[in-house]
Image: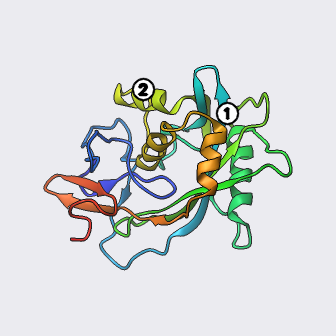
């Protein structure tokens, strides 16, 4: 991966991340063309509208979330584990409808009519990146007995996993994750049940989060609003 390239998904950055406040991007070799998107040195790209579905269920050891693995052959986020999601199919499509559709297409899970989708967050790709998305994340409870299956094209695997377990697997380099997924999993790990998660989400105001990508020598850092250096 070249120093001027970062990896994006739906709204943000990067598979090769290490811990820490700013999540420094690691420069690592790849056995295929660089999967990242180039940083933008020209006029800002208008972000495309997108939606993602955080599907939750209660399990014996606590709440679990559905993650799907992107096809490793794809240039865009190949091999990463993410929440089902993608761009709106048309301008008139509602974000919640797009989240339902992506869940059905990528994981073969259909939410019943009337199922509640609670707005959870909104993330916007940094202005420094060429390919940008303005993504609404929704949280929903899985239908009883729901079994996920990848479509074999965009996604090649699917699993239910506890948020803290996913983060632990990421720390052991066993589960490639992207920055927004990491930040969402960190928040989800604080909840004990689906009911608690949805109850909290219903009561808070969803404000857009737009990180920045800051170049430093041979690496790049992803900064969140409020972190040192974000405004500079």
Instruction: Give the class, few, some or many, for how many residues have Cα within 10 Å of label 1's Cα (few <14, many ≥20).
Output: many
Place of residue 211 in the rendered image (x, y in percent of width and height, measured from the top left): 36, 61
Extreme top residue here?
Answer: 60
Residue beneath disc 2: 169
Extreme bottom residue here?
Answer: 43
Q: In this view, does 191 lie to the left or right of 14?
A: right
Instruction: Using the rendered view, name the quadrant where residue 57 is placed.
Output: top right
Cα distance in 3D space between marks 2 and 1: 20 Å
Q: Can residue 232 be seen in this view?
A: yes
Colour scheme used in the picture? Answer: rainbow
Place of residue 38 in the rendered image (x, y in percent of width and height, measured from the top left): 35, 60
Instruction: Give the class, few, some or many, for how many residues have Cα within 10 Å of label 2's Cα (few <14, many ≥20).
Output: some
Residue at 27% over, 48% down = 21
Q: What element carries label 2?
A: helix
Q: Nearer the viewer, mark 2 or mark 1?
A: 1
Q: Is residue 46 above or below residue 186?
A: below
Residue at 30% over, 58% down = 223
Instruction: Using the rendered view, name the quadrant where residue 60 is placed.
Output: top right
Question: Which dot marks residue 9?
Answer: none
Place of residue 226 in the rendered image (x, y in percent of width and height, measured from the top left): 30, 63
Q: Is mark 1 on a helix, strand or loop?
A: strand
Residue at 60% over, 53% down = 201
Q: In this view, does 171 lie above or below 11?
A: above
Residue beneath disc 1: 57
């Amino acid at each position: 991966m070249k120093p001027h390239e970062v990896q994006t998904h739906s709204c943000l950055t990067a598979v090769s991340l290490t811990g820490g406040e700013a999540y420094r991007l690691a420069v690592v070799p790849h056995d295929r063309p660089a999967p990242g998107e180039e940083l933008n040195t020209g006029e800002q790209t208008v972000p495309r509208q997108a939606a993602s579905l955080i599907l939750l269920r209660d399990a014996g050891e606590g709440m679990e979330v559905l993650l799907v693995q992107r096809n490793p052959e794809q240039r865009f986020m190949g091999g990463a584990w993410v929440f089902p999601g993608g761009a709106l199919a048309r301008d008139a499509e509602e974000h919640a409808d797009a989240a339902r559709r992506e869940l059905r297409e990528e994981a073969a899970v259909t939410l019943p009519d009337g199922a509640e989708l609670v707005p959870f967050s909104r993330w916007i790709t940094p202005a420094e990146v060429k390919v940008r998305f303005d993504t609404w994340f929704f949280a929903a409870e899985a239908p009883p007995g729901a079994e996920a299956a990848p479509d074999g094209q965009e996604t090649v695997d699917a699993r239910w996993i506890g948020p803290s377990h996913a983060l632990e697997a990421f720390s052991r380099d066993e589960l490639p994750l992207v920055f927004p997924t990491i930040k969402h999993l960190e928040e989800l790990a604080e909840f004990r049940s689906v009911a608690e998660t949805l109850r909290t989400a219903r009561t808070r105001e969803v404000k857009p989060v737009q990180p920045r990508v800051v170049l430093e020598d041979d690496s790049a850092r992803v900064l969140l609003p409020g972190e040192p250096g974000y405004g500079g």
